[in-house]
Image: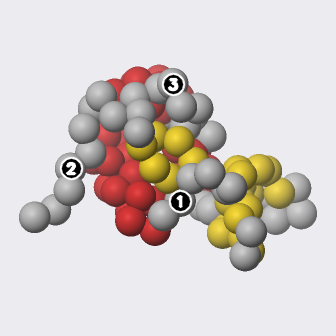
């Protein structure tokens, strides 16, 4: 059974991980004790909104406001969050 991403779930970065803009690479990166993950623009846009207060529905609404031309945004965000959770980048309470 594939886990689902609930609209009311609040995600945050995994403890010990930090998101930052890397000017030399012109992209967001995730820093963790053993290294770094380079993120594409979409992943960076999603992860910058994980503040421990926004739930998935609020996250999608904000991204839809910023990118009104995106037609599959909610599906893409849910897919990314599931992948990020499986990778161990994010967690929820």
What SS does tag 2 mark? loop
Closer to the chain start, of discs 1 and 3, is: 3
Label placed on residue 11 = none
| Distance (Cα) linking label 1 and label 2 | 17 Å
Q: Measured from the top left, where is residue 48 in percent x and y?
A: 62, 40
Separation of disc 2 and disc 3 at Cα? 19 Å
Q: Residue at x 83, y 57 (%)?
A: 22
Q: Secondary structure at mark 3?
A: loop
Relative to residue 65, is residue 24 depicted above or below?
below
On the image, the x and y values in percent for residue 62 come to 48, 25
Residue 9: image x %, image y %?
34, 34
Side (left or right) of 8 relative to 88? left
- The residue nearer to you, when weighing 65 against 2, is 2
Task: Please give the residue where the numbered disc 3 appears in the rendered image.
Answer: 53
Q: Residue at x 53, y 59 (%)?
A: 89
Residue 28 seen in render = yes
Residue occupying the point 71% across, 52% down: 18
Compare marks 1 and 2 and give the one earlier in the sequence.
Answer: 2
State the quadrant of the N terminus: bottom left
Q: In the rendered image, which residue does mark 1 sit on?
A: 89
Question: Which of the marked residues, 2 or 3, is nearer the chain's N terminus?
Answer: 2
Where residue 4 is drawn, which disc sits there?
A: 2
Which residue is pictured at 66% across the width and 69% down the height?
A: 37
Mark 2, other Cα within 10 Å: few <14 / some 14–19 / many ≥20: few
Picture layout, residue 88 above or below residue 16: below
Which residue is farthest right?
24
Horizontal placement of 48 versus 68: left or right?
right
Report the Cα–Cα distance between label 1 and label 3.
17 Å
- Picture quarter with the C terminus: top left
Look at the numbered discs 1 and 2 and tell me whether their residues touch, using CB distance below 8 Å.
no
């Amino acid at each position: 059974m594939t886990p689902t991403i609930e609209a009311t779930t609040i995600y945050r970065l995994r403890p010990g991980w930090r998101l930052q803009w890397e000017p030399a690479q012109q992209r967001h990166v995730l820093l963790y004790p053993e290294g770094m993950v380079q993120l594409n623009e979409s992943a960076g846009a999603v992860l910058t909104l994980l503040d421990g207060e926004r739930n998935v529905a609020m996250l999608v609404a904000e991204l839809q406001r910023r990118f009104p031309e995106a037609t599959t945004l909610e599906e893409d965000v849910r897919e990314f969050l599931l992948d990020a959770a499986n990778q161990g980048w994010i967690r929820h309470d």
